[in-house]
Amino acid sequence: MVPVGSLCTLLPLGVNLRGGDRSTCVLGGWREWMAAHSAAITTTVLAVLGTKSIGDALTGLA
């Protein structure tokens, strides 16, 4: 899980370091997309975490 979590930091950093002037456009596009879809992103993350918690609880009952 740590490598997946670190991608949230390392991927934009890598794009910024390697992309030069083009990186501003790419990262700006990512930012706009995330701002437009923030409700769906939040809902998906919370649904995954909730499903994991319920699954762990059901496994603990058995």
Image (cartoon, rainbow, N blue to C red):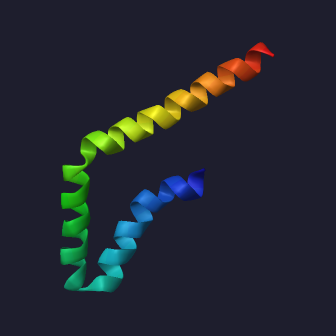
In x, y percent, where is residue 55? 65, 26
The C terminus: image quadrant: top right
Q: Determine which quarter of the picture holds residue 4.
A: bottom right
Left or right: 21 in relation to 12:
left
Residue 6 or residue 33, whichever sits in front: 33
Residue drawn 43% across and 33% down?
Answer: 46
Residue 16 or residue 44, whichever sits in front: 44
Q: How many marks?
A: 0
In x, y percent, where is residue 19? 30, 84
In x, y percent, where is residue 7? 47, 61
Residue drawn 18% across and 76% down?
Answer: 25
Q: Is residue 44 above or below residue 5?
A: above
Left or right: 20 in relation to 56:
left
Q: Residue furthest right?
A: 62
Q: Is residue 50 above or below residue 61?
A: below
Residue drawn 20% across and 51% down?
Answer: 35
Residue 58 or residue 14, whichever sits in front: 58
Q: Residue furthest top?
A: 61
Left or right: 20 in relation to 42:
left
In x, y percent, where is residue 37? 25, 49
Q: Is residue 43 above or below residue 35?
A: above
Residue drawn 35% across and 84% down?
Answer: 18
Q: Is residue 53 above or below residue 18?
A: above
